Image (spheres, grey):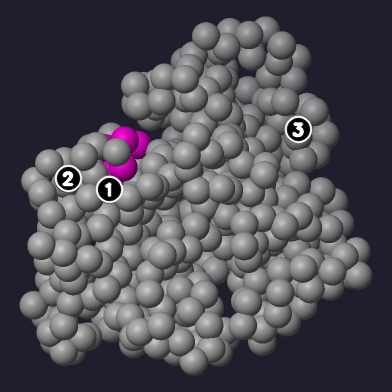
Amino acid sequence: MNPAPPHPAAPEGPRSGPDRKAMPGAGAAQVALWQQLIAVAGVLQAIRAGTSGTAALDAVGTALRPGVQALLFQVLRNLGRAEALRRQLAKRPPPPDADALLCSALALCWRADEAPYEPFTLVNQAVEAAKRHPATRAQSSFINACLRRFLRESDALVVATDADPVARWNHPLWWIKRLQKDHPQQWEQILHANNTHAPMALRVNRLQGSQAQYQQELADLGAGADAAGADGLVLHRPLPVQALPGFAQGRVSVQDMAAQQAAPLLLQGMDRTRELRVLDACAAPGGKTAHLLEMAGEGAALQVTALEIDATRAERIHQTLSRLGLAAQVLVADAARPEAWWQAANGGARFDAILLDAPCTASGIVRRHPDVRWLRRETDIAQLAALQKQLLASLWPLVAPGGRLLYCTCSVFRAEGDAQVQTFLAHNTDAHLLPSPGHLIPRAPDKQGAVPDNRFGDHDGFFYALLQKSTD
């Protein structure tokens, strides 16, 4: 699997709000459930073959997509249990198309209290889907028999799978073991958080209004939100971005509270009375670049260069900045090869501050991208850690004496966080670690001494280390 960007194919805002229960009358409910189940099984099969969930969903028709995404996210959050149940129901796995449909149905109905439809309805519609789709028609009787047996014996079958940690936690076994080693006191909390719905968090553009003003506007519309951090609001219920006041005019952006810590951390304590040269090294889709510019204020002497190795993703930086009415130098370039872009970016001058939001496993944003856990392989950690090490080594010489570099990843794995930074410090005696949050655990209050977070601690998993270069 190719190394993913730190936020793999993550849109700046949800297509129609974050995933929600696919209840009748919601979104694509005009489309028959059996049609949605066929599409869900197709996307699941693509994910099993290594395609990202976002890319696979993009291939689904517009009318189907909202309902399919809602169902798919629930399937992915219950896939470990579903596969364990399928093994109880069938001695051998059926062909891939049939297995994807069967596991999708089991994932959706194994807990009646959380099922988006009545289990009997899900079973009937899954069998209908099997009959109507050419790839599964020959297996429709088998699927019917398995699902009917599950309805009859569900309690016993679920108990029979309870001892399987993959079924219990709905994560690959290697992932569970890695968290147990990295976070022996918090691994259960992390896994539990990964299987919940992430809140929708907003970042108010302080150049166009205050946090309190925007919170009141939402309240006037009947949309509750809690203030979080200096610019953040956490919605009580998700909204389509089109329903957010002034979204198209750049008054607000969708950004998790953990990600909103990057710009304040990098700029805190810096002398903003003089011109500052800032590099956002892996910048797409541009949310952190924009936050840096918003924090700098109108007329501030902040020169921001945003790098992105992929031209398509770099275009998203332009789109983000355009919507917000902001400007930065955007370059399509490899941050690990500064000889190819440094002169163009900064005339050979070193940067006062560098933000390195490095490519990582994205293990901290699983509740927003539940496909990540099933796409990743344990070997990805070492490969991505090597890339992070290379980026740190390439960018550190570009930091001016007395300047700083903020290293961050949306990962909870220590190989991409604490261990990476400790190795860097051991080999770079001119680097000093400033007070930093370290590993932020999903749904956990920040550890003592960390940068204050929203009072609910309801944020993605992240890692932050702020490094300062000696002036000697």
Label 2 residue SS: helix
Residue tagged by mark 2? 425
Please state which of residues 293 and 413 is positioned toward the viewer in this rendering: 293
Task: Inspect the image, locate mark 1, and give the three-letter code of the amino acid beneath it.
Answer: Leu
Q: Are marks 2 and 1 in contact (CB under 8 Å)?
A: yes
Dot 3 or dot 2, earlier in sequence: 3
Q: Are marks 3 and 2 in contact (CB under 8 Å)?
A: no
- Horizontal and vertical percent for residue 72? 60, 47
From where the camera sits, is residue 108 visible? yes
Residue tagged by mark 3? 114
Task: Inspect the image, locate mark 2, and give the three-letter code of the amino acid beneath it.
Answer: Leu
How many marks the image carries: the answer is: 3
Label 3 residue SS: helix
Chain part drawn in magenta: 413-417
**Disc 2 and disc 1: Cα gap in Å?**
8 Å
Dot 2 or dot 1, earlier in sequence: 2
Residue at the spot 58% in from the left edge and 8% down from the top edge? 160
Residue tagged by mark 1? 433
- Horizontal and vertical percent for residue 104? 60, 38
- Horizontal and vertical percent for residue 91? 47, 15
Q: Nearer the viewer, mark 3 or mark 2?
A: 2
Please state which of residues 25 and 39 is positioned toward the viewer in this rendering: 25
State the predominant SS element of the stretch in magenta: helix
Residue at the spot 25% in from the left edge and 58% down from the top edge? 468
Dot 3 or dot 1, earlier in sequence: 3
Task: Inspect the image, locate mark 3, and give the three-letter code of the amino acid beneath it.
Answer: Glu
Label 1 residue SS: strand
Q: Quadrant of the C terminus?
A: bottom left
Name the image quarter holding residue 157. Answer: top right
